[in-house]
Amino acid sequence: MKIVAIIPAGGAGKRLKAQKAKQYLLLDDMPVLVHTLKVFQKSKTIDEIVLVLPPDDVASAHQKLINKYALLKVTAVVAGGKERQDSVRNGLAAITRECDIVVIHDAVRPFVTQELIKQVVVAAKSFGAASVGVKAKDTIKETKKDNLIATTIPRQNLWLTQTPQAFKFEFLKKAYRAAYDKKFYGTDDASLIEQIGKKVKMIEGSYENIKITTPEDLVMAEALMKKKTGSKMSSRAC
């Protein structure tokens, strides 16, 4: 069974307000993106990696990333699109050889583990589609006009969705075709699967599997990396 990971890293990271795109910020003297890729490189579950980068970065990817950090499982580097969904679609198009399971993971979630990757792939094999997530710890309120609370949503069945997400290749291709036919853009890949009537299995992940999107996330990432390595952290643009 062949398993391919798509790592979309095509965004500019405007919310982080950094000089460089967030995937290139350094944690422990290495780009966030590389921390993420190294987990997939070491994973025995993953056979190949498709990396999606900003169009201007594709030409230099081998020199600056793949060769420099020995990311030998990266078999294709493609340009991202306008939205994340467009970038993943470009990644899917780059899978030209036989594939059974596709794993999609945010480039700026560097604290993913090999065990999480394995668990979500196992679930996808059984259920066809699976996502990592964590249960909501806070009370969730739904508001209407003027931010007035309309209702309190019971949290026992609420999950904060993360990546990796894993899907049978044929399911995901069908979901993407349907999404583009309907001009539907989802907030994650699992939502596209839901749109074609397929169920998605939720796998409990880790609260440390954060996505670096805001300056506050970067502070948390530095703390987590310090905990992981015991080193003094710095975050800079490379």
Image (spheres, rainbow, N blue to C red):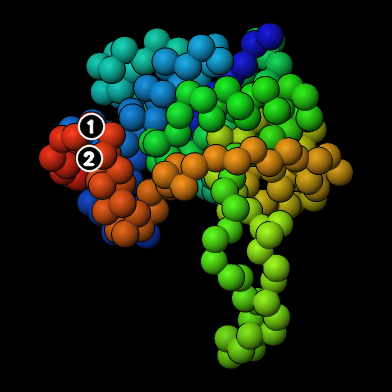
Q: In this view, does 104 lie to the left or right of 169?
A: left
Give x and y (percent) for residue 122: 67, 22
Which residue bears the numbered disc 1? 229
Label 1, secondary structure: give it: helix
Check contact, mark 2 vs mark 1: CB within 8 A.
yes
Which residue bears the numbered disc 2? 226
Give x and y (percent) for residue 238: 20, 37
Please tell me which residue is depicted at 63% across the width and 29% down the height of the picture.
Answer: 120
Which residue appears farthest toward the left when viewing the image? 232
Give the total number of marks visible in the rendering: 2
On the question of residue 79 being in view, the answer is no
Give x and y (percent) for residue 115: 51, 25
How many neighbours does mark 1 have within 10 angstroms: few (below 14), some (14-19), or many (20 or more)? Answer: few
Please tell me which residue is depicted at 33% across the width and 28% down the height of the picture.
Answer: 34
Callout 1 amino acid: Thr
Q: Is residue 8 above or below residue 215?
A: above
Please tell me which residue is depicted at 55% across the width and 45% down the height of the picture.
Answer: 162
Q: In this view, does 73 lie to the left or right of 61?
A: right
Give x and y (percent) for residue 103: 60, 27
Please tell me which residue is depicted at 30% across the width and 43% down the height of the picture.
Answer: 224
Callout 2 amino acid: Lys
